[in-house]
């Protein structure tokens, strides 16, 4: 059951697709109080209470014990003390014996969540604007709450099948020659590859929708020839449009009046990569249409996928914030700084970026009214996703596209995926990447992944290998790193063969992973779940923070510690461990319910299959087009009979459903493996 409670005058955030009558009575579970404009929601937490939700954010799977904020931020320092990163996914699920409910705060502005931070026994959620709809979700179990939420907010995005291939990315690839070299190094060494991302350096002076004519003299021919090698190019697009007369997107945006304006009616200007930029008003339908059409030249060149960035929006500085910092510097010039002046000057220059004042300086037009940006800040990235998704759909009707964004809000899960932004090459970020996955899935974002190897600072061989072992299972499997860090392509490392073998497992599992993704998307389920969703009565399972359920049959338990040669795993039931070294080289070890120490040397990683189930493994390939599902090995310990519903389709059509696309695979009593022949899928 879902109930809607309304506060103040909420706007349509685009998150919710169900229209529900407003409840007039008091809202259960919470003490609700107004304090000026703010609305406060307070509930008691018992010692056993667990809180899931908040999608992409820092800290563990159980969010209890910290303070979070919904305020989309370009902050690359994802440390434990942070309260928000790039997304606002305002769903919480409270879970304890005898009490289970979800609550979604459909609020486009700042929301603060104290989940047992000030007091361990109290959760308090504060909407700063006080204009919002709150949806209460009640169901029999955690999975039902997740399903209800997807019913409320709409189905998850369906990517094309090729998007499940391995993608290589790096900030710095600046020419066709460099991109070709990356492709060749992979192909030469038989490292599977389906995509290469083009970061900002492909553009002419970082201007969106341009490309360097000397470095990419015939983009269309280049895209075609890479596609012949089964490699797609995936360019980046940033939110800001360079303020420059004669640059077509600026001229057309200016002419249409599509940029966000200040109170005096002039365009708001702040710097991003290309220098001073204007910011499309993604909250306006006509501006979205204009921006979506700007993708055309790239689509005409044959591009089928994009990543959208800097769309919180990130602001490096505005003339106003810069002037304040310089004024302070000027006033202190020549002085011997005391401690507070020393700090003040550092703070002033740090504050030029993403300054709260700047977010109050410009306006959007919603329903014909001017709304100050900070009131609806968290909708900006989702608006950009919508603009580009619609633009791509207009150009390639009926076909799926790859799209992933840095910033997001619930609702954007219908149009694209997300990546987890600028992590570091830290072991703690490998763990955090894993812990974000189930909460992102809970909020509808099924297509996601992190920068494998870590984006900021230099990775090490073992860290990249362990990152790849997690990436084998994440829908977006992309190795990405920052300019000036150690080069991070697999072939740069002495253990590249080990890394390649790890990637081969992705391709052997691809029929299963694709099938589980599509089934989750088409039936409003989750691909990754906290163990609590499947074993709610098991006190150990519900508190497990470093293992995840994957699809209907499996559990994963990645190694995330430096120099580890294995790890402890808790099995909530008997399971078969597949200990992978490559697509063709693995051990099958049945294990009983309980605690186990699993030895996992650097090139080894486990997948656990629930007893009574069997999962398909194919021979793999070097790209997704090579994957065949006519000969499969069904792996699992089956006592009587197991059934696996394998979802297959053409990998690209937009209109797909479960009907007609599911092949039922029956496996009779078997020890561990059986070979299966199916009708070819293409
Ligand atoms: C941002 C993105 C990162 C990208 C960089 C340059 O930091 O998050 O992925 O490489 O900008 O475009």
Image: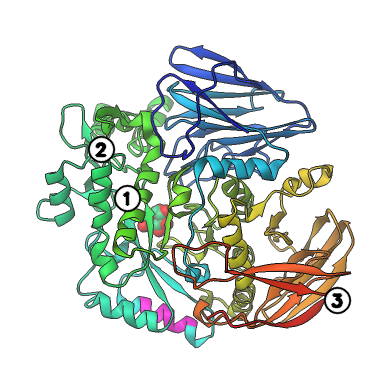
Outermost residue toward the left in this view: 246
Quickly name the residue at label 1. 387
Q: Residues within 10 Å of mark 3 (few under 14, many from 20)?
A: some
Alpha carbon of mark 2 to alpha carbon of mark 1: how far?
25 Å
Nearest to the eye among marks 2 and 1: give it: 1
Q: Position of residue 679 (x, y in %)?
A: 62, 82
Q: Toward the viewer: 21 or 110?
A: 21
Residue 496 seen by the camera: yes
User: Image check: 310 left or right of 424?
Assistant: left
User: Image check: 190 left or right of 109?
Assistant: right
Q: Toward the viewer: 183 or 285?
A: 285
Ligand 1 sits in quadrant: bottom left
Nearest to the eye among marks 3 and 1: give it: 3
Q: Position of residue 80 (x, y in %)?
A: 59, 41
Quickly name the residue at label 2. 318
Q: Identify the mark nearer the N-term, 3 or 2.
A: 2
Say whether marks 3 and 1 touch (CB < 8 Å).
Answer: no
Alpha carbon of mark 3 to alpha carbon of mark 1: how far?
51 Å
Question: Is 153 colored magenta in this rendering?
Answer: no
On screen, residue 476 above or below 369: below
Which residue is located at x 73 percent, y 62 percent? 554
Q: Identify the mark nearer the N-term, 2 or 1.
A: 2
Q: Identify the mark nearer the N-term, 3 or 1.
A: 1
Say whether marks 3 and 2 touch (CB < 8 Å).
Answer: no
Quickly name the residue at label 3. 670
Q: Residues within 10 Å of mark 2 (few under 14, many from 20)?
A: many
Q: Quadrant of residue 628?
A: bottom right
Residue 333 seen by the camera: no
Q: Quadrant of residue 377?
A: top left
Alpha carbon of mark 3 to alpha carbon of mark 2: how far?
66 Å
Instruction: Write down the region rendered in magenta.
Output: 179-186
């Amino acid at each position: 059951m879902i109930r809607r409670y309304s506060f103040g005058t909420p706007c349509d955030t685009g998150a919710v697709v169900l229209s529900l009558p407003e409840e007039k009575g008091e809202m259960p579970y919470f003490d609700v109080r107004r304090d000026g404009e703010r609305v406060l929601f307070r509930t008691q937490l018992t010692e056993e209470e667990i809180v899931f939700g908040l999608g992409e954010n820092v800290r563990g799977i159980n969010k209890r014990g910290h303070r979070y904020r919904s305020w989309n931020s370009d902050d690359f320092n994802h440390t434990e003390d942070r309260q928000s990163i790039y997304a606002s996914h305002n769903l919480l699920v409270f879970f304890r014996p005898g009490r289970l409910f979800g609550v979604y705060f459909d609020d486009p502005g700042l929301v603060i969540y104290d989940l047992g931070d000030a007091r361990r026994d109290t959760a308090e959620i504060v909407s700063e604007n006080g204009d919002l709809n709150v949806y209460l979700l009640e169901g029999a179990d955690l999975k039902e709450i997740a399903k209800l939420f997807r019913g409320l907010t709409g189905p998850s995005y369906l990517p094309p099948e090729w998007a499940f291939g391995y993608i290589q990315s790096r900030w710095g690839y600046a020419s066709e020659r460099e991109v070709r070299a990356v492709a060749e190094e992979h192909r030469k060494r038989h490292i599977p590859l389906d995509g290469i991302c083009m970061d900002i350096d492909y553009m002419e002076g970082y201007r969106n929708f341009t490309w360097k004519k000397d470095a990419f003299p015939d983009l269309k021919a280049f895209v075609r020839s890479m596609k012949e090698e089964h490699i797609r190019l995936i360019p980046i697009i940033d939110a800001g449009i360079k303020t420059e007369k004669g640059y077509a997107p600026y001229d057309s945006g200016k002419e249409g009046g599509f940029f966000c304006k200040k109170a005096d009616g002039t365009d708001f200007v702040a710097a991003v990569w290309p220098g001073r930029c204007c910011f499309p008003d993604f909250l306006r339908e006509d501006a979205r249409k204009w921006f979506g059409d700007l993708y055309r030249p790239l689509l005409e060149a044959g591009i089928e996928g994009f990543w959208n960035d800097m769309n919180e929006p990130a602001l490096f500085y505005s003339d106003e914030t810069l002037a304040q910092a310089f004024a302070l510097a000027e006033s202190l010039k020549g002085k011997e700084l005391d401690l507070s002046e020393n700090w003040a000057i550092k703070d002033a220059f740090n504050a030029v970026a993403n300054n709260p004042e700047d977010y109050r300086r410009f306006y959007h037009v919603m329903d014909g009214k001017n709304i100050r940006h900070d009131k609806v800040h968290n909708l900006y990235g989702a608006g950009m996703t919508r603009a580009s998704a619609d633009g791509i759909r207009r150009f390639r009707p009926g076909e799926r596209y790859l799209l992933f964004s840095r910033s997001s809000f619930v609702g954007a899960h219908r149009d694209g995926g997300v990546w987890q932004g600028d992590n570091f090459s830290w072991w703690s970020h490998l763990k955090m990447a894993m812990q974000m996955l189930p909460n992102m899935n809970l909020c509808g974002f099924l297509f996601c992944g992190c920068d494998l190897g870590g984006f900021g600072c230099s990775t090490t061989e073992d860290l990249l290998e362990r990152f790849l072992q997690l990436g084998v299972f994440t829908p977006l499997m992309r190795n990405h790193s920052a300019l000036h860090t150690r080069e991070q392509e697999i072939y740069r490392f002495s253990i590249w063969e080990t890394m390649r073998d790890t990637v081969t497992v992705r391709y052997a599992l691809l029929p299963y992973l694709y099938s589980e993704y599509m089934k989750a998307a088409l039936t409003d389920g989750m691909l990754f779940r906290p163990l609590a969703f499947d074993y709610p009565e098991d006190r150990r399972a519900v508190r497990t923070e470093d293992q995840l359920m994957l699809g209907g049959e499996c559990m994963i338990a990645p190694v995330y510690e430096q120099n580890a040669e294995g790890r402890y795993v808790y099995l909530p039931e008997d399971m078969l461990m597949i200990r992978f070294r490559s697509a063709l080289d693995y051990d099958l070890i049945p294990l009983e319910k309980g605690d186990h120490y699993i030895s996992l040397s650097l090139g080894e990683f486990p997948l656990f299959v629930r007893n009574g189930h069997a999962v398909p493994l194919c021979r793999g390939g070097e790209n997704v087009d090579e994957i065949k599902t006519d000969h499969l090995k069904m792996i699992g310990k089956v006592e009587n009979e197991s059934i696996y519903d394998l979802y297959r389709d053409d990998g690209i059509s937009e209109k797909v459903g479960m009907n007609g696309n599911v092949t039922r695979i029956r496996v009779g009593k078997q020890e561990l493996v059986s070979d299966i022949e199916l009708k070819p899928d293409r």
